[in-house]
Amino acid sequence: MFTLLKHDDFKEKKIIKLFYFMFLASIISPFFFVLLSPSISEIYHFLNWIVITTIFVSIIYLLLVVDFVLKKFDIFSIKYIKYLFLFISFIVILSFNFLYFDNLIGKNDKQIRKEYQNLQILVDNNNFEYLLTFIPRVQVLWMLKNKTKFNSIESSYSSLNFNQLEQNFVENLKFLNINKIDFADIISNKKGSWRYNNEFVKYFSWYKYQANSLITFKNTNDFKYDEAEFIKKSSPTKTQQIIIPQFEINRLLDLYDKLSLNQDLKKPDLIVLKNDSLVENYSFIDPNIYCRLNNFKLLKIYYQKKSDFCE
C-alpha cells in the first residue's frame, strides 16, 4: 500500500486511503463501543466485521496492484482481466449459494417448513385466542397473524422483567403437569459440541447467565468442577454460552416448590411443543380437555376439544 502511495505514476491514491481508513475504523470501533456502552453481549460481531473488512480491503488492494502493474508494463489488456475477475467472482458466489442452499434444505428442514405451513393453515381456519408454546418461531408466526395473547413469551420478545418471566415459565410448566425433578433436568446446564447452552434457560432469561473467561453471572465461581474448568478455557467471544450457577439453580428449584399454579391462568386454546424436547417428554396434557393433531411429526400440536377440527 505505502509503495503505491509513494509511486508518482499511481493515480488511485484516494481509493487507497479510503479503504485504509475503513480498515482502521473496523479495528478501533470495538474500543469506542466498549467505552461508551454500559454493556455488551455479542462481541464476536466486531471480530466478524474486522475479518470481513480485512478480506474486502485486501481484495481491493490486490486488484489495484494488478491493475497498476498491467497498465505500467502493458502486459495484458486490463479490460480482459476485469472480465476474468467478474467471471471468477460470479462462479464463487454461485457455488457458495448452491452449497448453502443444499445444506439448508435437508430432510428435517423440508419437513419442519411443511409443518409450519400446515400450522399457519390451522391458525387461519380456527378462532384460537391463547397460545402456549416455548418455540420462538411459532410465537412469531402467531404475532404475524395479528394475535397478541400468549400464555408464555420468549424473553427477548417481552418487556417483562426476569422475575415475571421466571414465574410465567414455572406456571406454564406446572400447567403441563411437569414435576420438580423433571424441572431440574429442564434447567440443568447442558454441554453441546463446543459450548454450554440450554435453550429453555435462554427462553426465560436471554443472556442473563452468560458464562466465559471474561464474565459470569454476578462474577461467581459457584459452578460444578467441569463447568468451572470449561469456563476458564472459554474465549470471551463465546458470548452465547449459557451456564447457570448452582445458587441460581437452587433458587429456581425453590421457586418451583413455592409457586402454585394460578387457578385464574387462562387455558390456552392451542399448545405447540417440539417433539422429543424435554418439555414435551415430561409434560402430561389432559386428554379430557385437549386433543392432538396427528399429522405432525416434528411438532406436537394440541387444541381444546371445543375446536371444530378436534378428532
Image (cartoon, rainbow, N blue to C red):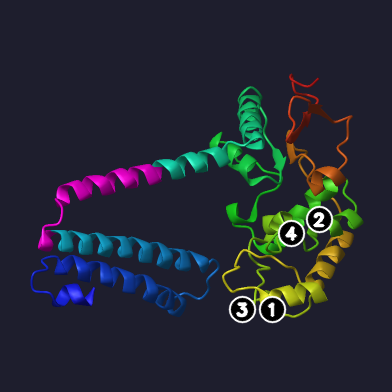
The residue tagged 2 is 186
Up the image or down, 304 lies above or below 246; here it is above
The residue tagged 3 is 214
Name the main secondary structure of what is drawn in magenta.
Answer: helix
Up the image or down, 120 lies above or below 11; here it is above
Instruction: Estimate the spatial distance between the alpha carbons at disc 1 and disc 2, rounded to whole Å.
Output: 25 Å
Question: What range of the chain is rendered magenta?
Answer: 71-93
The amino acid beneath tag 3 is: Leu
Residue at image position (51%, 69%) is 43
Q: Position of residue 11 (x, y in %)?
A: 10, 66
* Quarter of the figure that contains the N terminus: bottom left
The amino acid beneath tag 4 is: Glu
Mark closer to the chain start, 2 or 4: 4
Tell me whether circle 4 and circle 1 mark residues in contact (CB < 8 Å). no
Q: Position of residue 110 (x, y in %)?
A: 62, 32
Up the image or down, 185 lies above or below 16; here it is above
Tag nearer the camera, 4 or 1 = 1
Confirm whether residue 259 shows in the render.
Answer: no
Mark closer to the chain start, 2 or 3: 2
Magenta stretch encompasses residue 309 = no
Q: Nearer the viewer, residue 55 or 245?
A: 55
* Quarter of the figure that contains the C terminus: top right
Instruction: Estimate the spatial distance between the alpha carbons at disc 2 and disc 4, rounded to whole Å.
Output: 13 Å
